Image (tube, rainbow, N blue to C red):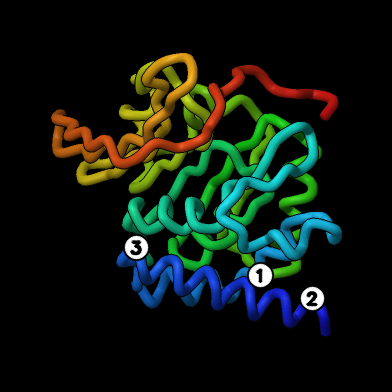
Amino acid sequence: MKTAMLEREGFAALMLRLRAEGISNINILTAVEQTPRSRFVVPHLAEHAYSSRSIPIDCGAYMEGADLAVRLIERLRVEPTHRVLEVGTGSGFMTAVLGRLAERVVSIERYRTLVAEAQVRLDNFGLRNVVLRHGDGSGGLPGEGTFDRIIVTGAFPAIPRAFTEQLVHNGVLLAPIMLDDERCVMVRLTRTGSRFDREDLFEVPYLPLVPRIAAFL
């Protein structure tokens, strides 16, 4: 009962903060409500599941604050027919929400432990249109075709060409780009033919993406 109450109160508080930001897309809010965040954190951190602050998870990683996670999904502009690539599965929360919004989601994560934990959560939600991969996502996911939407949760000094090549016409890429040693901005890139339009959205707390596979974590 306590967990259920925390969930309801946390979700209600999050909705108030999101509406104050102008985020009111009913499809996104419904998908978030159907994906209880307390299931993505360890029990002793459940009361912080809907916090705007990042929450530590296994392998020295963390999950985005609830507000930032929803804000990113809203800026990605996912449609029901879209094929989405997520680079950095993490806890699997954004993966699960995207799975409720898109036709298919492929998510890649360098930490084997995080992949295994996220898979259990996704299975519990019955999300069959989401595929998890254990691997190095620093170059996207070559060999899986192109995507309508790509979202990356590890920062780069500049947008790698590999990601732009995996976008379809009218595709959208969200990726954090380092401005300097301490500041990072989320960039939205929209592809129109061979042209790419860049928008700098807002600063985000992401760390530089580490290439290579973490074989033992």
Can residue 25 be seen here? The reply is yes
Residue at 37% x, 58% y is 74
Which residue was labeled with disc 2? 3
- Going from N to C along the chain, the mark reached first, 3 or 2, is 2
Residue at 43% x, 69% y is 28
Is the residue 21 above or below the residue 180 in the image? below
- Going from N to C along the chain, the mark reached first, 3 or 1, is 3
Quick check: 163 left or right of 31?
left
Q: Estimate the x, y position of residue 99 in percent, counting from the top left.
A: 53, 61
Mark 1 Cα-neighbour bin, 10 Å: few <14, some 14–19, many ≥20? some
Q: Estimate the x, y position of residue 89 in percent, counting from the top left.
A: 62, 43
Residue at 35% x, 72% y is 25
Q: Amino acid at mark 2?
A: Thr
Which residue was labeled with disc 1? 36
Residue at 72% x, 58% y is 40
In the picture, the disc for residue 181 is none
Q: CA distance from mark 1 to mark 2?
A: 10 Å
Q: Amino acid at mark 1?
A: Pro
Q: CA distance from mark 3 to mark 2?
A: 27 Å
In the picture, the disc for residue 21 is 3
- Label pair 3/1, CB-CB below 8 angstroms: no
Disc 2 element: helix
Q: Amino acid at mark 3?
A: Glu
Quadrant position of residue 26: bottom left
